[in-house]
Image (spheres, rainbow, N blue to C red):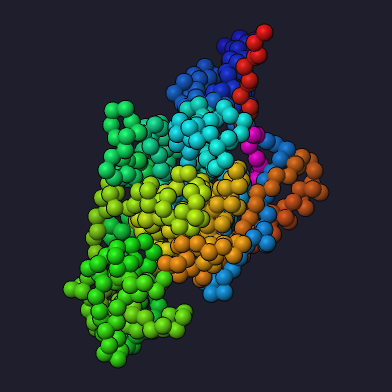
Amino acid sequence: MSQDFTHKKLELYKQKIREIPNTSFNADQKKLALEILEKADPHNLEAIFSLLAKRIEVGFVFDIAPEVQQDAICLLKHNKELSFTPALCQQQHAMIFGENYDALKNLLVLYRGKVDCIYIDPPYNTESTKQDGNDYKSEQNSSGKFGYRDKFMRTGWLNMLNERLKLAKDLLSDRGVIFISIDDSEQAYLKVLCDEIFGEGNFVANLVWQKKKGGSQDSQDFAKEHEYILCYSKGTWEIYEQTQRHEEKDFNKTIDGKRAKILKLEKWGNHSLRTDRPTLYYPIKDPNGQDFYPIAPSGAEGCWRKKPENLDPEHIFWQEDSKGRLTPYEVLYFEEVQGKDKIIKTRTIFTDCGTTTDATKEIQAIFGTKAFATPKPTSLILKLLKIATSPNSLVLDFYAGSGTTGQALMELNREDGGNRRCILVTNTENNIARGVMYERIYRLCYGKGTKGESFAWADKNEPFSDQGWEVFEGQTHHLKIDDYETGERLKEVAIKAFKTLEPSCDLGDELNIYYTLSCLNPQKQEPKPPKGP
């Protein structure tokens, strides 16, 4: 094969690569492909080009494959003014305001391979929000309430999730798992995308959540009652709720000379009133021999976690709570439960995890209004966290919306005495970050609004005064690759924020902010149709 012929063939293949539409191959991808061809063995040139072309044919074809913005980085900035630590704080969580792609790149610096559970509720790419004034073609939201930009071209929607899910996979621990809420419109396409990113062998289940009861006439042919939750693992994963294990490290108290752990006997959170569970309202004897009935955080009649026939009086431990009230706890002794793992099969159809109506009522109880259009019920996220987390897990939600995942995690920590940590990320459009997510979490922790407002939830529930939250905001900085002085200064800014987010981190000199924290180019504007004559 002559050098001249080889050169002509190489140039032909390179030209074909350049002619590929940007909707299929962006500038970065084309550059890489050209470099591969340049370095290819002349005898393998045709085979390599065929491989590259085949990848283009069978892969997803996106609206606009995003390109790295080489002259800009995004750093997290700690907002001391908004961060809060209640008086009894035992666990510190984090909220991040800003573009979730940039937030994920920052989180990868600290938490690559360390997140045990990710839950996201991304835009469903439906026409539903168009009816609420959130048409993807509209220049602004005309409804006056929050809603996602929830109608993309399908390829653009897949592209948006593709870039973020690839980062999410890198964040997951070896036993990590991700849950993604979706409905009929895009479920099939999303599953194919997730098969490609996480691997078909790591598909765990397509969970079905009954979101409505009694039927809904939102479809011409069927009354739609359900949505889906796609579940994928990073590697080897075992459902926590499927095998209820007893680990010695969780038994951190000594009672009667034996290792033990205690769980509050009175029910907390959702369905904790006598009216919710009448059969779980009954008396037990206190240390003075008096009848003691369960009391809800609001002071109303409450309920126990167990039926009377399942409660052993010899395994009740009494101690004062934070208000000085004598309170019963159930005692588990390690020596009694060691080796007695309990198998609990988790069903793939969730019929008892709350509905969209319940979710709306929760928002109204916290805000007094329907402050968020499409919330999920806390009980649904609580179910997923019980399935997927241990008491010390790190949990991430990078489409956090109104902050339901944060509430569910705090409720679970209270329920089982866990130390789970939560990171919530949401954008700043329509004041969703500060006006809804932040406001909700603040109210739950203090029992009052940021302006001292009272609300219905606080009348029936005890605030999460042992849970604190640090707040960070994403900030874009322009940085050229050869501007070393600015680069070193911004590196110190980044390290300072990282150490606030994770005080135990040791970054050393390995942080390359040019590559690690580079931004994506913003999504290009859709061309406006030409005006008529």
The residue shown at (39%, 64%) is 269
Q: Nearer the viewer, residue 319 or 94?
A: 319
Residue at 45%, 70% in the rendered image:
462
Residue 92 shows in the view: no
Residue, far left: 309
Q: Which image quadrant is residue 294 in?
A: bottom left
Q: Is residue 530 above or below residue 98?
A: above
Q: Is residue 186 left or right of residue 453?
A: left
Q: Position of residue 375 (x, y in %)?
A: 45, 48
Q: Position of residue 199 (x, y in %)?
A: 40, 39
Q: Quadrant of the N terminus?
A: top right
Single out the residue that lies furthest toward the bottom: 288
The magenta region covers: 514-522
Q: How many marks?
A: 0
Q: Residue at image x 45%, y 44%?
A: 374
Question: Does residue 517 belong to the magenta stretch?
Answer: yes
* Quadrant placement of the C terminus: top right
